[in-house]
Image (tube, rainbow, N blue to C red):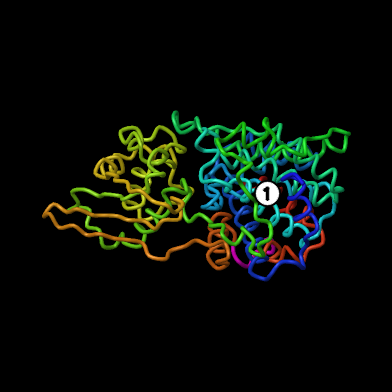
Amino acid sequence: MTISENFIDKYSQINYKDFDSRTLEAGRNLFLDAMGNIIASIRVGNNKKLNQSMAQSLAENSNLTPLYIGMLIHSLDFDDTHYDALIHTSSITVPAALYTAFNRRINGKDFISSLILGVDIAVKIASIEKHAFHRKGFHATSIVGVFSSAFIYGYLNQFSRESMVDSLGVAGSFCSGNLSFLTDGDNTKIIHPGWASLGGCNAAELVTFGITGSSKIFEDKNGIYNLYSDVSIEDKHFDLSKDFWEINDVSFKPFPICQLSISTLRLASEIIHEIDLSKVKRIIINLPKDSYDIVAKDKLIKSQPRTSYEAKFSIYWSLAALILNKKLTVDSFEKKILKDKKIHDLAEKIDVTTFEHTETAASIGGQIEVHYKNDEVKTYREENSTNSITNSASVIKKFLENSNLSSSNENVDQLLKIEEMDDVGKIVGRILDEQIKKY
């Protein structure tokens, strides 16, 4: 059998009762975190045209809805990540599930199940080899997102095995998304998950029109791995026999920045009270080598970012802003803050050294040295820190901060009990419409 056929045979037969309680909690939290990011983007994104387009799309059940939802989840770069796969997961699963739920009655159990399965497929495709797509200049989230989205659409619409295989095959013609934003500081990256979600859903819909897709979209000589990576896929094996679900290894972001800077800032947030800025001569970040080009290369530019998106990919600016302001939130990247001379001055005192590693860069704990003017040096290392998506208390806290809602709000209660709902689209559509009108 082909890779696509193996995927469909494995995943299409699984449903809610097949998941353990921890995995279901992860699915619920993944969705809640995504909703918080959508509302935060509506609230602070200052993108009235996008918000209005989203509102119109919801009202009309437009096929552009997955695009807008994916963009809103990802636009603040605050959405969850899977470190081994180096992808964002909710922004390439939740849009397809919601789009389907807006167009047909989907209960909470099936909805959450589709997210868990979609994450697993995306992670499996992306993590077959370390940085497989990134090495060729492609954004892995965008490349694999069309497949997770196509699967979710087919799963929730109860496609046949043949149609689901075709959906993956057609989805392979929608892969796109490059890393050029790292050079110019533009925000092209925010459309990648939305475009992947749109492409996946449209691919599956096209199958209902009689369009067929290659069952060998992954392993063919003109398939995904041969075109978008240097992976010799014939030498690889997808282990689909494990009972472990990859969603349990997803991490939510405590800061709205590139995941490769998270561990450094997480450590910094714990030691801020120990740093005497008036006596600091230099701060050295010890960074995994794989992270350097993305968040630390070209210090002169990154220390004084031109755009908020460039700031999110600058470990110098992000760390300096966190230390000076004692926080780094979705409200920390306003234009006036980007121009703050105090942040620029501290960023100039920050340097980066790198080290070789075998672990995935994003999973390695932060390491910081603070050098003082009297030649005293204090070294800090992060031990066993995590932002697991299964940490419900932290995920809920982040959601409430992002959404600016209270825990007693009726909408919050319904989102926390999403699995008990018999019409997810009706509930979520109403909540999103309220938030768009509010902001």
Q: Amino acid at mark 1?
A: Thr
The residue stretch that appears in magenta: 406-411
> Is 300 included in the stretch rendered in magenta?
no
At x 13%, y 52%, the residue is 373
Question: Picture coordinates of residue 379 (x, y %)?
Answer: 25, 59
Question: Picture coordinates of residue 420 (x, y %)?
Answer: 77, 67
Residue matched to label 1 = 93
Question: Picture coordinates of residue 234 (x, y %)?
Answer: 64, 41
Q: Main secondary structure of the magenta part?
A: loop
Examine the rendered structure and indicate whether residue 415 appears above or below residue 158: below
Q: Nearer the viewer, residue 334 or 242?
A: 242
Question: Which quadrant, please, contains the C terminus?
Answer: top right
At x 32%, y 36%, the residue is 299
Drawn side of residue 209 relative to residue 328, left or right: right
Q: Secondary structure at mark 1?
A: loop
Question: Picture coordinates of residue 154 (x, y %)?
Answer: 80, 47
